[in-house]
Image (cartoon, grey):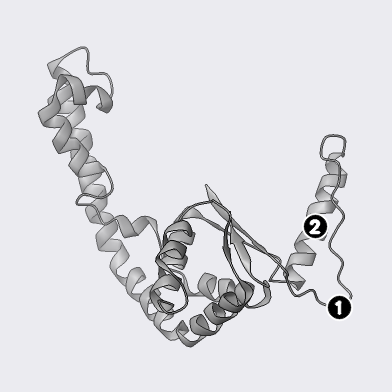
Amino acid sequence: MGFDLHGENPTVKEGTVKPKEIDWDTATQEEKEKYWDLQREFRDANPGEYFRANVWFWRPIWNFVCEMCPDILTEEDFERGQYNDNHLIEEDRAKDIAKRLREKMDLARKRQKKYETDAPNKEKFNKMLEDAGSFIFEKISKPKSELITCPGDMEIHDPENYKRWETLVHSGHIQFDEMSYPINAKVIEEFANFAEHSGGFRIN
C-alpha cells in the first residue's frame, strides 16, 4: 500500500513537457518503458507534479507535518491524511507547510538520528516477542488440539493462550510499533519541495 500525491497546479519548468498518456491496452513493452522514462524525467524536473511514499514512510511524514503545523492543518486534515481518500490541501496551506518543514529540518534530522540509535535494541526486543509468540503457538497451544492448525484457531480453541499470543505479536500492544515507521529527514525534505511547488495537492 502506498500514498500517491498529485499536485493540483504544479509549477512546470520552462522547456519541459508532460508525456502524453499512452494506450496501456495496446502499447508494447518498449513503448511503456519509454513513457515511464519520460514521465520520470518530467517529474524529476518538476517536483510539484507528484510525490509517492509507501505507508511505512508516509505515516511518519504526515505525523511530523501535523505536529509541526497545528496552526495550518485541522483535525480533519490529520485524520484524512492517513487514508487514500483524495483529501485536498490547498495551495496557500501547501506553501505554508513547505516553509514550516524547512524551518524544522534540524529537528527531523535529530529525530532520525535517535530513531537509528534506538533501532537495534528495539528491533531485538520485537524479535524476542515474535519468537515468544511462535513458541506459544507451536509448543504450548498447537499440541492441545488437532483443530489448532494456525494461530487464528487459538481464538476459538485456546482463547487464553490466544490472548497471550496476540499481545506478543500484534501492533498496538507491547511491541515497539514505530520500528515499522522510520522517520527519514531526506524524505521529509523531498515532501516539502513537492508541497512548495504543487499548487495544492491531493492525498490518494
Compared with residue 92, is residue 39 higher up or lower down, i.e. above or below? Answer: above
Percent x, y of residue 101: 50, 80
Quadrant housing residue 154: top left
Separation of disc 2 and disc 1 at Cα? 19 Å
Residue type at mark 2?
Asp
Whichever of callouts 2 and 1 sits on the residue coming sooner in the sequence is: 1
Position of 77 with respect to 90 (left or right) is: left
Badge count: 2
Q: What element carries label 2?
A: helix
Q: Is residue 20 above or below residue 77?
A: above
Q: In this view, which residue lies farthest toward the bottom?
A: 103
Where is residue 152 shown, x and y percent of the image? Answer: 27, 26
Residue 49 x, y percent position in the rendering: 71, 66
Residue at screen point 84% across, 62% down: 18
Q: Name the residue under label 1.
A: 14
| Neighbour tally class for label 2: few under 14, some 14-19, many 20 plus, Cα within 10 Å | few
Give neighbour class at mark 1: few <14, some 14-19, many 20+ (Cα, 10 Å): few
Left or right for 151, reference 85: left
Q: What element carries label 1?
A: loop
* Residue ID for mark 2: 37
The kind of residue on which mark 1 rests is Glu
Out of 12 and 130, give the one closest to the viewer. 12
Nearest to the eye among marks 2 and 1: give it.
1
199 on left or right of 45: left
Residue at the left extreme, as displayed: 160
Query: What residue is shown at x 21% (from left), y 48% (from top)?
Result: 128
